[in-house]
């Protein structure tokens, strides 16, 4: 797709929703359509952002409170956008990102109680013009998601946010659904309790519907 801008798709949701599996599957589908597709994640996606990821998820930033953590997530995001996302989109690649700015809105904003106006101001600085074209919200009951996350990590202990209580994770789910309700054009909600193959098919049908014109152009 030389000469035209790529697309930016993000996945959001609580713990154990299965985002990373679906990110990988969507990237494979896009590649099968001849699209250069890049999978990435947050916090992380660039060397400096990965260093911040290790610091935040170890829990060492927790004493800073939700505002301090939001600042660190945003610093990581700004670097990720500059180093990976913006250049990829500019060359025509599609970027599929596991978590992005809605995670800060939900985790540090609604569930963590940092001032929403401050969160929005941080997002403007961190992402500038790189708003996602489409976001898939993988919605799941926190009891199911946390049990999956626990199974996945085996003997390792819970990380910074998995370790929060059930009330936090319930508030988080409500926060994500509320964000989706206010951004219906951008955010599609899917039922993440579904089995992975069925979910993959549903996500692909939503993505291919939304970007039908781009996919047709690519095929011609
Ligand atoms: P990760 O292991 O990637 O979690 P998951 O597999 O659930 O996506 O860890 C990222 C954690 O950081 C996750 O608990 C969500 C949290 N987070 C925030 O609190 N704010 C943010 O802005 C981002 C990007 C992530």
Image (cartoon, rainbow, N blue to C red):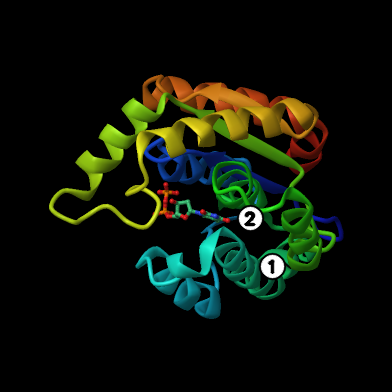
Measured as percent of width and height from the top left, residue 95 is found at 64, 54
* Residue at the image point whose x is 58% and y is 68% from the top: 68
* Residue at the image point whose x is 69% and y is 67% from the top: 81
Measured as percent of width and height from the top left, residue 199 is found at 47, 24
Element at badge 1? Answer: helix
Position of 101 with respect to 62 (left or right) is: right
Residue 89, quarter of picture: bottom right
Residue 9, quarter of picture: top right
Measured as percent of width and height from the top left, residue 78 is found at 69, 70
Nearer to us in this view, 51 or 72: 72
Which is nearer the N-term, disc 1 or disc 2? Answer: 2
Bin the neighbour count of mark 1 within 10 Å (Cα to Cα): few under 14, some 14-19, many 20 and up: some
* Residue at the image point whose x is 37% and y is 66% from the top: 59
Nearer to us in this view, 140 or 61: 61
Q: Which mark is residue 36?
A: 2
Q: Which mark is residue 183?
A: none
């Amino acid at each position: 797709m030389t000469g035209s801008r790529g697309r930016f798709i993000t996945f959001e949701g609580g713990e154990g929703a299965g985002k990373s599996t679906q990110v990988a599957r969507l990237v494979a589908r896009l590649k099968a359509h001849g699209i250069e597709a890049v999978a990435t994640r947050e916090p992380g996606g660039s060397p400096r952002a990965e260093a911040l990821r290790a610091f935040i998820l170890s829990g060492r930033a927790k004493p800073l409170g939700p505002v301090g953590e939001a600042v660190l997530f945003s610093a990581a995001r700004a670097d990720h956008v500059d180093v990976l996302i913006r250049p990829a989109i500019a060359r025509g690649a599609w970027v599929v990102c596991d978590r992005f700015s809605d995670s800060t809105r939900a985790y540090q904003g609604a569930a963590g109680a940092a001032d929403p106006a401050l969160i929005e101001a941080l997002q403007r600085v961190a992402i500038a013009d790189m708003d996602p074209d489409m976001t898939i919200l993988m919605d799941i009951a926190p009891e199911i998601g946390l049990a999956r996350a626990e199974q996945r990590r085996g003997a390792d202990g819970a990380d910074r946010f998995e370790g929060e209580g059930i009330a936090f994770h319930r508030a988080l789910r409500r926060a994500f659904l509320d964000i989706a309700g206010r951004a219906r054009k951008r955010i599609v909600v899917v039922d993440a309790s579904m089995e992975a193959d069925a979910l993959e098919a549903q996500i692909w049908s939503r993505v291919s519907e939304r970007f039908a014109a781009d996919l047709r152009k690519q095929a011609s």
